[in-house]
Each structure stands twice: as structure tokens, then as C-alpha cells.
Image: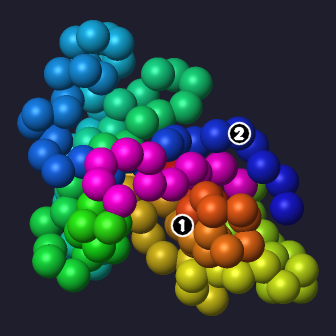
Amino acid sequence: MKILGIEHIGIAVEDTENRSPFWEHVLGINRTTTEIVEHEGVKTDIYNTGKGKVELLKSISDDSTIEKFLNKKGEGIHHVCFEVDNIKQAIIELKEKNISIVSENPSIGAEGYKIVFIHPKSTGGVLVELAEKTT
Ligand code: CO
């Protein structure tokens, strides 16, 4: 697989409105999109530095993974996302190497990216997302 760079860092927040001023006004990073990802039960606010993004993740569903994460660990870094050139190829390679992935097939995440998550047990405790741009 070919990693093209760090795409974003996903951060779980209780409330995006409380947390946005730090990213937007203290660090001065432009918010580029706000999007509901219905099947994951989250609202995402994306801030783009131009060299990697910050994705604030707020739960909008009681059984979302972000809700569970917040209940267990509180606010903070939830995952790190790397951009890949070909996600299907990446999944094949991960399976060949017995790396534990959260789903066998890519799903559609924020910004329409094709995404897959690698289980923290295979990475030393970090939830890793791989994403392929679709446009
Ligand atoms: Co993400």
C-alpha cells in the first residue's frame, strides 16, 4: 500500500460549538466543512491546515462509537487517518499480514472518502483510519 500522508486527526468532543473557538480562533484554522455522517451517528467539523486536517467528532446517536468512546475515555484524540492511493489494495495487504480491521469492506466517511479502520489491538493502542479520496 502507498501512504500519501496524514489526512486528519479525529478528535471526540462533547460539543463542537464549545470546542470550535480553539481551532478556529486561537489556532486560526479555517473550518471547511460541517457534515452529518448518518450511518456513523456523528457530526463532523473539519478544519484544514493545508497540510493535514483536524476532524471534530460529536455524537448524534446514543449507540455511536463516539458516544461509547466519550463515556469510556472522555474528550480527546480518537483516531489518526492516513490517506492511501488504493484502499481495496490496502485492505488486501492488511488481511495478508493478519492485521485486524474493523470491517472487510470500505465504507463512505466524511467528505465522501472511502475509509476503513484498523483495530487498536494491531497498532499499539491507536485507532488508525485509512482513507482514499474519491474525487
Ligand atoms: Co476520520
Give, as a single range, the part of the protein colored magenta.
Answer: 73-84
Q: Residue at x 14, y 74 (%)?
A: 61
Does the Cβ of the disc 1 residue fall within 8 Å of ligand 1? no
The three-letter amino acid code for the residue at tag 1 is: Lys
In front of the other: label 2 or label 1?
A: 2
Q: Residue 130: give its label.
A: none
Q: Outermost residue, right direction?
A: 97
Q: Position of residue 81 (x, y in %)?
A: 58, 51
Quarter placement of the N terminus: bottom right
Q: Which residue is mark 1?
A: 114
Q: Secondary structure at mark 1?
A: strand
Residue 75 lies in the magenta-colored region: yes
**Nearest to the observer: residue 104 or residue 80:** 80
Does the Cβ of the disc 2 residue fall within 8 Å of ligand 1? no
How packed mark 1 is, by other alpha carbons closer than 10 Å (few <14, some 14-19, many 20 or more), is many
Left or right of 3 in this view: 60: left
Q: CA distance from mark 2 to mark 1?
A: 15 Å
Q: Residue 5: give its label.
A: 2
Dot placed on the residue nearer the N-terminal end, 2 or 1: 2
Magenta part, dominant SS: strand
Left or right of 116 in this view: 22: left
Q: Position of residue 42 (x, y in %)?
A: 24, 63
| Residue 22 vertical position relative to residue 43 in the rendered view, above or below | above
Decide if residue 1 is in sight here: yes
Q: Position of residue 107 (x, y in %)?
A: 48, 76
The three-letter amino acid code for the residue at tag 2 is: Gly
